[in-house]
Image (tube, grey):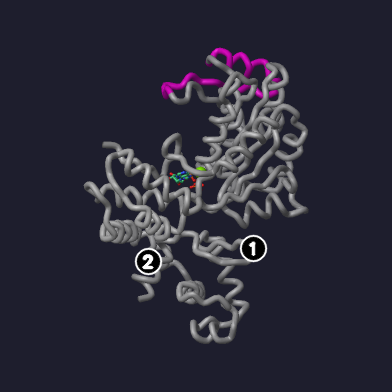
Amino acid sequence: MDTPFVFGKIAKSENFTDRERETALLVTNFRSLINTIIISPRRWGKSSLVSKAAETALTGKSPLRICSVDLFNVRDEEEFYKLLAMAVLRVTSSRWEEAVESARRFFRQLLPKIVLSPDPLNEFSIDFDWKELRQNPEEVLDLAEKIASEKNLKIVICVDEFQNIAGFDDQLFFQKRLRSHWQQHQKVSYCLYGSKRHMLLDVFTNPSMPFYKFGEVLFLEKIDTGSWKSFICNRFSATGKKISVELAEIIVRLADNHPYYVQQLSQQVWLRTENSCTEEIVKQAHISVVEQLSLLFATITEALPDNQLNLLRAMVAGEEALSSNEVLTKYRLTSSAVVTRSRKALIEKDILDSKAGELSFQDPMYRYWLEQYFFK
Ligand SMILES: Nc1ncnc2c1ncn2[C@@H]1O[C@H](COP(=O)(O)OP(=O)(O)OP(=O)(O)O)[C@@H](O)[C@H]1O
Ligand SMILES: [Mg+2]
């Protein structure tokens, strides 16, 4: 039997829960061509949400087209333009001949090479001469707008893992370039999302940055306990197994409502449950998830300098006044300036998350591992 829980994949249909408000907001923004920015730590469900909203927004006959560009593996501008051009051509053509025809018509300076691909998921791929492209990137940046105007379409371009542009050469210049074209588009809107909160906050909310006030910013939260409890109980009963609401709640608490971990832990519990779940099964499953991760956690931890480690120790112990003299002495933190620096470094490493000045661990399993295995 297929397990009723998924993790590490886009959560769709019966695997998707909650997010009604966010989905409705995104659907409205997609249909009204309002630019949207979604920010959350890793694995909280951005990609799943966008996919769900896109599916909903596309129901019925409409001139709306939604395409996505995933920057996960993209290292430079050139690769970005290639993916963007390909995504736009694909979503606006029903056959590959039509895509080739569009490429011929809409590119004036650039003469892209379009190759029919043997991969059935990607019907074709596109290649530009980098020198030409560097001189005329606007042809790619404005491609969607031109096609949308001509074919009477509305296009939403979703760019996933947007934080990866930080690795491009001269990213500020690149941002200026994108913004100057994209803000003029009338028939195209953008949904940009990613996970480095501090970096994306700077890109989208710093008045001196090109993307300042580019669109509505949505900070995605974790999924609340109530939704998780009914989701877990339903998924168990749909597969002929039983779990009580109380045990479902324990799963959610152990995973700290973190979408990926709630699903992973639920799956481990489900696999161990023959008919009816017990507290012992939940405990075992939790230990198993943490132990699977312990090598990874050990590697992360070994690379941390003493001050950062000491700060984590203080946090795990539940200390709140991290810069107080008492905490500084107790955890051998050299000075409050060191605390500030370590804190910043740990946020940049995605170990801690700071929201409205409040610090928390991004990964609930890591926090547990530190507490129960490492600092013990
Ligand atoms: N709405 C949801 N309902 C149920 N499970 C979800 C939901 N959203 C996310 N998840 C769980 O979290 C996992 C990660 O989701 P997703 O890949 O959408 O997050 P993400 O924020 O895009 O992650 P990343 O930062 O790694 O790109 C999914 O595989 C699934 O297990
Ligand atoms: Mg994602």
What label does residue 33 carry, if any? none
Tell me the mark number nearer the camera, choosing from 1 and 2.
Answer: 1
Mark 1: amino acid: Ala
What label does residue 356 carry, if any? 1
Q: Secondary structure at mark 2?
A: helix
Magenta extent? 96-120
Q: Is 311 situated left or right of 61 in this image? A: left
The residue carrying mark 2 is: 369
From this view, report whether residue 149 is shown above or below residue 355: above
Question: What is the CA distance from the residue labelled 1 to the residue labelled 2?
Answer: 26 Å
Is 56 magenta? The answer is: no
Q: Secondary structure at mark 1?
A: loop
Instruction: Count up the numbered dots.
Output: 2
Residue 282 rendering spot, x and y as whole percentages: 30, 57
From this view, report whether residue 117 is shown above or below residue 196: above
Res 182 → quadrant: top right
Is 117 magenta? The answer is: yes
Looking at the rendered image, the quarter that the C terminus falls into is: bottom left
Q: Residue furthest left?
A: 274
Q: Is 82 situated left or right of 233 in this image? A: right
- The residue shown at (34%, 40%) is 4
Mark 2: amino acid: Trp
- The residue shown at (33%, 59%) is 286
**142 or 151, nearer to the observer:** 151
